[in-house]
Amino acid sequence: MSIEKALEKASLAESLGPAKRSNSIVDNQTESTHTNDALDAFFLTDDNNGNAKAHSLDAGEKNIERFNWEFLHEHGFIDPSVGHMKIAEEFRSIKRPIMSNALGGIEKGIERSNLILVTSSVPGEGKTFSAINLAISIAAERDKQVLLIDADVAKPSVSRVLGIKRTPGLIEYLEGNKIDFSDIILQTEIAGLRIVPAGKAHQFSTELLASNKMINLSRELSERYADRIVIFDSPPLLAATQAEVLSSMVGQVILVIEAEKTAQNIVIEAVKKLESCDVVLALLNKTQRSMDMNYYGYGQY
């Protein structure tokens, strides 16, 4: 089934009301061989998308991915089930200008404003940490849905960090016509958050990410459902060419910078690769200083 047809089906289901939408999701899980259940689940609105983890899972809900919360707790990630966390408060502040751009992009002249690329200059600055926390924070909004795509196809980290089993992902979708995009979207235990894994290693990953199929996918995600947020975790700008390729397909870029370690000339070199982007925001990470309310730091990371 094409993406367009799947999205049209989702739009129809969305108009049937809360009870029918809930039944549609359950039916899709049991008939996944001939429906675009994952895409339907992403584009349907969660009625109770609060700040807690999704409803408790029973043995029949095998299509919902559970996270490795023990690992996430140890490494300072946001836990939606905890009422107050410093890291959660920090990302509430960080996401506000991003959300303002994403949902008001037309008025501000930002194309594809709901597509957000998270990258860094070099490896180790915390881009995946930032991308995951940003996705969890936005998904906590009651009326927002987030699709987190692991586009760091050379060294994927999203699935490993979250504890998701290896599955077909973005590369498998881009390399042929055997897999629908809906087939690679994973439902998670956080209401409103879906994941697309990177998929297998591929020697022509840059070419696949620069392909017309990827361009068409980004356009479809941006234009057809502009109120949904799509976050790409990409490779570092100076370590691989994929990030520069992807940056031309999104409306916002978040450049993660490691405090007191990444040299200024490196950051300047990375920023030059983003000159064609409408919006480039900097996020200072791993600082150990005492911060005031307007200075973002992540001592836990």
Image (spheres, rainbow, N blue to C red):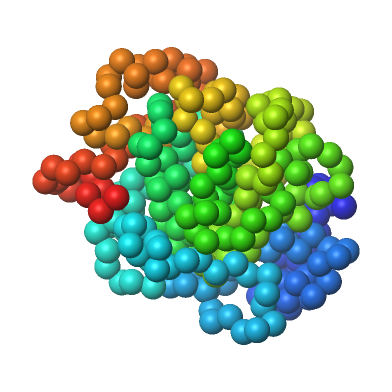
The residue positioned 33% from the left and 46% from the top of the image is 94
State which quadrant residue 89 falls in. bottom left
User: Left or right: 242 with respect to 35?
Assistant: left
The residue positioned 17% from the left and 44% from the top of the image is 288
The residue positioned 40% from the left and 63% from the top of the image is 71
User: Left or right: 117 with respect to 34?
Assistant: left
Measuring from the top left, give residue 49's x and y in whole percent.
Answer: 51, 69
State which quadrant residue 153 falls in. top right
Would you place residue 227 above or below residue 251 in this image? below
Would you place residue 20 above or below residue 170 in this image? below
Residue placed furthest toward the left: 290
Give the camera-side residue of 280 and 61: 61
Measuring from the top left, give residue 232's x and y in whole percent.
Answer: 55, 41
Label tally: 0
Would you place residue 258 above or below residue 198 in this image? above
Does residue 51 appear in this view? no
The residue positioned 62% from the left and 50% from the top of the image is 197
User: Left or right: 266 with respect to 180?
Assistant: left
Measuring from the top left, give residue 28's x and y in whole percent.
Answer: 78, 70
Does residue 249 appear in this view? yes
Measuring from the top left, give residue 61's x and y in whole percent.
Answer: 67, 78
Give the camera-side residue of 294 and 66: 66
